[in-house]
Image (cartoon, helix red, strand yellow):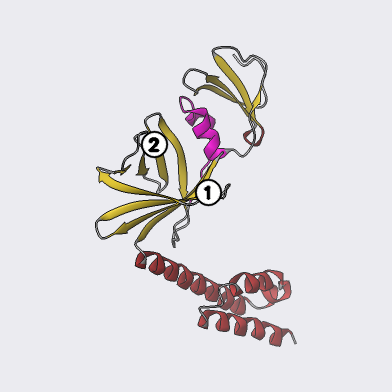
Amino acid sequence: MKYLKNVSLIFIFIIAISCKENVEKVAEVESKVENETVFYNNNDFEKAIIQDSLRILKTKQIQSEIANLKSKGIFGKWKTNHKGYKTNIVLTKFNSDFQATINFLDSKSKPTINKLEIKGNKFLVKGSDAKEFYLINKDGNLELWDNQGLFTIGYNTYPSLEVKKKPKFELDKVLGMNIFTVTGIFSQSNPKTLEGTNNDYWIVYYLDLNTTFKVKKSTMDIKKAVSGRISNLK
């Protein structure tokens, strides 16, 4: 019986791989494999077949997604989590024309389409009074800039066979940055103003970062960042 159960799992994988429509089978079969402890313990050969079949299926899915996006002229996809600006951003090239399509995730607003022109490594938004532009950085993420500086960063969601590193919040790397840029990228918490705030500086705590920031109000730049909730931060 154990043998038949193992063979049935392999058969399910073969069916899933042969049918492009069965994308949802991946999660279903993966769950069955994870729960099949006897199967894992007793037959490494069959386990290897299942794992390799899953790898092949996922690779084919990603390759199919990339081909589909390229056929539509889409060469980049990113997601922003900035408070009040949660979006999916798609960059597209039609012949020699570039455009950005912005889909808003936290409102019912219609997508915004911006015509772009390339200048150096920047994608300038045509007709923008705020001098907006996009910049794809060395990590493949999308930086959104305007005449006030870096607004936020969109993280790469374009399908890839490479493993993507998730952004990591580091205290020593946020000094001098705009507080709303930093928290827009790394935090989902609401700011909590602490004692010590005055006309010049804002002492603010973000729970999910477990970090207190000292922010210069005139520029909103971070002057100090420490772990924990610290009132009257000097």
Q: Is residue 14 above or below residue 130?
A: below
Amino acid type of disc 2?
A: Trp
In the image, 145: left or right of 216?
Answer: left
Label 1 packing within 10 angstroms: few (<14), some (14-19), many (20+)? few
Q: Is residue 222 above or below residue 137?
A: above
Query: What residue do we see at 54% from left, 30% from top?
Result: 171
Q: Is residue 17 visible?
A: yes
Dot 2: what SS?
strand
Find the magenta span and give its range. Answer: 165-186
Q: Position of residue 134 (x, y in %)?
A: 36, 43
- What mark, if any, has residue 145 been given in the picture? 2
The verdict on residue 180 being magenta is: yes
Query: What residue do we see at 54% from left, 37% from top?
Result: 184
Query: What residue do we see at 51% from left, 83% from top?
Result: 18
Q: Position of residue 191 (x, y in %)?
A: 63, 29
Q: Nearer the viewer, mark 2 or mark 1?
A: 1
Residue hosting label 1? 109
Instruction: Work out whether residue 59 or residue 95 is closer to the camera in this orientation and state it.
Output: 95
